[in-house]
Image (cartoon, helix red, strand yellow):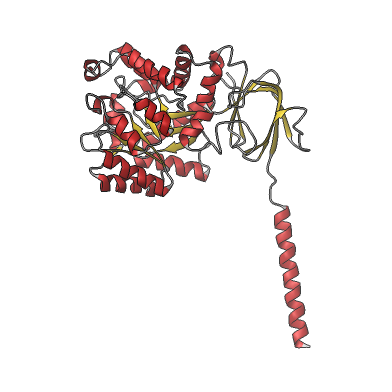
Amino acid sequence: MHNKLVISLVLFLLLVSASAFSQEKAEEPKEAVIALVGGTLIDGNGGAPLPGATVIIKGEKIEAAGPAAEVAIPEGAEKIDVSGKWILPGFIDCHIHITYPFDNDQYFTYDDSLGALRGLHILNLYLKSGVTAVRDVGSPIEPQQALLQAMALGYVDTSRLYPCGQIITVTGGHGDGLYGDGERLADGPWDFRKAVREMQKAGFRHIKISPTYTLEEVQAAVDEARTLGLMITSHGGGVSDTHPPTMVEIAVRGGVDCIEHPPMIGEGVLEMMAEKGVHSVPTMSVYRKLFEDGFMPEVLKQRGWTLKTIEDFFHKARELKLVMGIGTDYCGGALEYPKLYPGAYFTEMKYYVELGASPMETIVCASKNGAIVLGMEDKLGTVEAGKLADIQVLPGNPLEKFDVLGKPEMVLVGGKVHRFRD
């Protein structure tokens, strides 16, 4: 009799637990479903625009995108009529320093707390402009960590951040002495390897190295990045290069994923980049502004740098079909250039078109190519099923007039809707 009572009690408790679990499961909130209906879709892959498109977003991801006749709208979905509007992927800035001081006073009195807020300010400006992700290629560690943690905890709701942490450079190399300990000095292959490990431990998934390094140092950094599953890019050289220039060639031979603003480079190096699948972020418009404003370093002029040097690189890179992302790097210029954000991004896009890229090609550079540079092409960069729902809705046709860029009426980041009005 006693055993029967025990068994009955155990069964009763199991039933109560199962019932409570079922009720708890039933009360879990369902993922929101949104349907963007009636807009013209530029999906980021470079194909012809699709009028009358429907985009289904479930939770943070895109569930379907295509012609209205082929995409069923789920029952209960929130329909957002975007007829007459243009649907594009969110853009990506592949080269920025979001905590960079805005003027001399801020530079020489740099503070991490203010740096984090400055970074948040830039991210918010970008969110309102349709740039939904940025790669910070070298800033002090603590502000970047604070922003990442604040995003993870839901304290801030803004564009995505993919930071490199500190620039890893050699003693006396490019970046040595950067504001707020924005650099990690490393000398020798083992120190480069350790520096990569430190950035990974600090929470970063992207690495940036800077000349003047040796081939052995680059190879050590690249090997460690590969071991840890990190993307690795390199500064292109510039004032820290040798003459004749060798740094880009060393970086490419060493196995980096990307070169930032390549300067004058040696014979055959661009072809080597194309062969190895090395990407590039040219950041051309900031160089044009430096030339125009008289801030281009004298040593580069002595080496024969002109604006044509940079433009020739772009033309040849296009011929070789290098994957190029859009990046800005508007720092410097007597430390006033950061004040030009967010417009600096669209200045760079317009420069691509001035140099012969089509508007559609440039939009692909800003979206799909940016995701490739980040190593996030499986999640970002295009409006198609399975990707994160990072989307912008523009009031006009960007293929006819680029001035419509930067003025979205609505931006989604991970499916969350942000609406903007003038």
Q: Position of residue 103 (x, y in %)?
A: 32, 24
120 lies left or right of 172: right
Which of 189 and 86 lies nearest the eye of the viewer?
189
364 up-or-down from 208: above or below:
above
Q: Residue at x 31, y 47 (%)?
A: 193
Total numbered badges shown on the rendered structure: 0
Outermost residue, bottom side:
1
Q: Residue at x 46, y 22 (%)?
A: 342
Q: Position of residue 308 (x, y in %)?
A: 34, 13
Instruction: Determine if residue 367 is in view.
Output: yes
31 lies left or right of 350: right
Q: In terms of image quadrants, where is residue 295? A: top left
Instruction: Determine if residue 406 is in view.
Output: no
Q: Quadrant of the N terminus?
A: bottom right
Q: Position of residue 236 (x, y in %)?
A: 32, 28
Q: Position of residue 51 (x, y in %)?
A: 70, 20
Which of 213 and 153 lies nearest the eye of the viewer?
213
Q: Residue at x 46, y 25 (%)?
A: 326
Q: In terms of image quadrants, where is residue 260? A: top left
Q: Quadrant of the C terminus?
A: top right
